[in-house]
Amino acid sequence: MDMSRRALLKVIVLGDIGVGKTSLMNQYVYKKFSQQYKSTIGADFVTKELQIDDKLVTLQIWDTAGQERFQSLGSAFYRGADCCVLVYDVNIQKSFETLNNWHEEFVKQQAADPADPGAFPFILFGNKIDVDGGSSRVVSEKKAREWCASRGDIPYFETSAKEGYNVHEAFLCVAKMALEGE
Ligand code: GTP
Ligand code: MG
């Protein structure tokens, strides 16, 4: 195959402990969801191939541990990333507020990279919108979109890893953004 029609894209998923990072990836790649909570340790990736126009894209999606301090993975880990997915839980205020830290820390790490740090493609997922039929939600879509606008028009998707709601759409956007920046 013509190699110019192939792309390997590195995607990093960040967010607080328990917001559903691993579940979103499992739903996207394996169409599986487990109610059981197994906290991620360290970082690991899964791959997913998809076709975008005439390109065969391989997404290398890196899952990280929400409990770990950002720096613990080292700047080499963040370098070479093509897109950063930020995840929060719409039912937990704190996970929304911490987005500032995740975003800031990532930008800082990227700044070590000669590539234009300001233009880095982020995307935000508001996860677990299925919980209690939406009645235990504490962060409104409006608030989330305001935050995205304040960080340079970050695309926003509301998702449910449990129901599989919007997961494919959200990761398709990830792939397109990563491909554009390549
Ligand atoms: P760490 O690896 O510790 O950082 O957590 P994580 O962000 O990977 O969260 P994980 O995917 O392990 O999910 C945590 C818990 O939330 C698990 O019990 C999941 O079953 C549950 N969960 C994840 N996504 C959803 C969702 O969309 N809806 C509901 N109802 N539960 C979810
Ligand atoms: Mg995890």
Image (cartoon, rainbow, N blue to C red):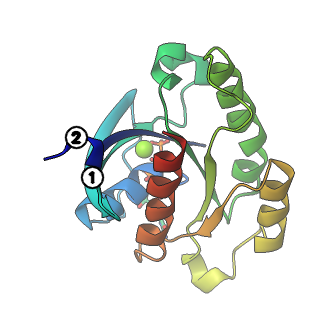
Q: Residue at x 68, y 27 (%)?
A: 116
Please provide percent x and percent y for residue 39: 41, 41
Q: Nearer the viewer, residue 56 or 58?
A: 56
- The amino acid on which the numbered mark 2 sits, given as a three-letter code, is Met
User: What residue lies at 32% left-to-right and 65% top-to-bottom?
Assistant: 33
Contact between labelled residues 2 and 1, with CB atoms less than 8 Å apart? no
Work out whether 172 lies above or below 37: below
The vertical placement of 47 against 132, above or below, is: above
Q: How many marks?
A: 2
In this view, 67 is above or below 57: above
Instruction: Identify the residue position indicated by label 1 in the image.
Output: 48
Disc 1 residue type?
Answer: Lys
Q: Residues within 10 Å of mark 1 (few under 14, many from 20)?
A: few
The image shows residue 108 at horizontal and vertical percentages of 71, 22
- Tell me where residue 163 appears, x and y as whole percent: 41, 77
Mark 1 secondary-structure assignment? strand
With 151 as the anchor, is 110 left or right in this view?
Answer: left
Which is more toward the observer, 129 or 107?
A: 107
- For the residue labelled by badge 2, is the local secondary structure a helix, a strand or a loop? helix
The residue at the point 78 percent across, 40 percent down is: 100
Q: Is residue 19 left or right of residue 5?
A: right
Residue 3 bears which disc, if any? 2
